[in-house]
Image (spheres, rainbow, N blue to C red):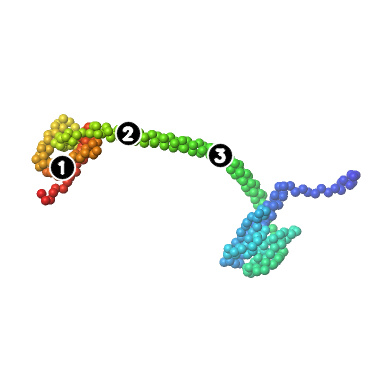
Amino acid sequence: WNASSSSSIISLPLITPTQRSINLIMASSFAKQRTTEALKQLQSIKPTDGFITESYLTTDGTTLIRLKRRGISLSEKGYLEIVHDASSTGCVVGITSYGAGNVGRGVVLVEKNGAVCRDLRDIRVILRNPAASNVGNLRAMQQEREDNINRARNSQQTRGATEIISEEDNKQILQFFVLAVLGLIVLRALTSALLGLYILGLPLLYMYAISTAPSLESFDAKKELKRVLRGENLPEDHPDKPKDWLSQTLARVAASVTTEVAGLGGYEVTMTDYLGACKVASVNLLAANQVFYWVGVFGKWRFVTRRDVESDKND
């Protein structure tokens, strides 16, 4: 090779990845805008036919578009885009492939008057590019695409970190589960031990109650009535409980008088023995129409309650 021959070499311009990305974005943007314009055209001439478009992704990653009328697709397959052939036939066409330049090959979906095409005849259309003002937004669209890619990457990283954290959480949950199982085992053992003590202690308690139960002869009806009437069984904070010496003396005297007067009308004493461990005594004051109840257990008679009874109407 000589200098003259080397100077005749023609260098071809190289397309950078950035330029290729911009071209793809431009083509996709133009296709979307042409599809939008075609749909607006159909909705303007047939506003009641319910024309809509539906996009779906094929197995090879291609996005195709179906044209639907009242929820029913006009064809089984989808198209690269839907265009309005405004410069020639006025029909709405589904593009199946692209030719040289701005030529698109497709089939007629809707006639110029808005009627659905029945034969889906083939047609070639000139694909018009959008206005220059729309082209000026390509840089923003590219930036939005890059932002979406970055968000997807960050989402993947976040999912990875979440999976790591989830493994740690799973370990903690497993530890808590083991501790809970051990706690249940210990609780069951304690329950069994307490049940055993209860089973062993119940006979002992019964024997103790038998040995300390007061005898039926130890119950003095008048003495127990006086104690009840002077408020000896009342709690310390009860308003009727005598507090000082004077009130206690007056209550003692009133209880004695009341008991003697009530005793003049007669009273009935009923004694009941429950297996030798517990005795129940009831005193029915006939004149006062009241019945008093005591329980004898663990070496002492304890007042339980009183209740009013109706007088015998036959008396």
The residue sitting at 64% across, 46% down in the picture is: 149
**Quadrant assignment, res 86:** bottom right
Three-letter code, disc 1:
Asn
The numbered mark at residue 167 is 3
Residue placed most toward the observer, 157 or 171: 171
The percent position of residue 310, horizontal first and vertical second, equals: 16, 48
Disc 3 secondary structure class? helix
Q: Residues within 10 Å of mark 3 (few under 14, many from 20)?
A: few
Q: Residues within 10 Å of mark 1 (few under 14, many from 20)?
A: many
Disc 1 secondary structure class? strand
Which marked residue is nearer to the observer: mark 3 or mark 2? 2
Three-letter code, disc 3:
Glu
Residue placed most toward the observer, 134 or 266: 266
Say if mark 3 contacts mark 2, CB within 8 Å: no
Q: Which residue is mark 1?
A: 284
Q: Earlier in the sequence, mark 3 or mark 2?
A: 3
The residue sitting at 16% across, 32% down in the picture is: 248
Residue placed most toward the observer, 192 or 40: 192
The percent position of residue 78, horizontal first and vertical second, equals: 65, 60
Above or below, 184 against 96 in this view is above
Q: Earlier in the sequence, mark 2 or mark 1?
A: 2
The numbered mark at residue 201 is 2
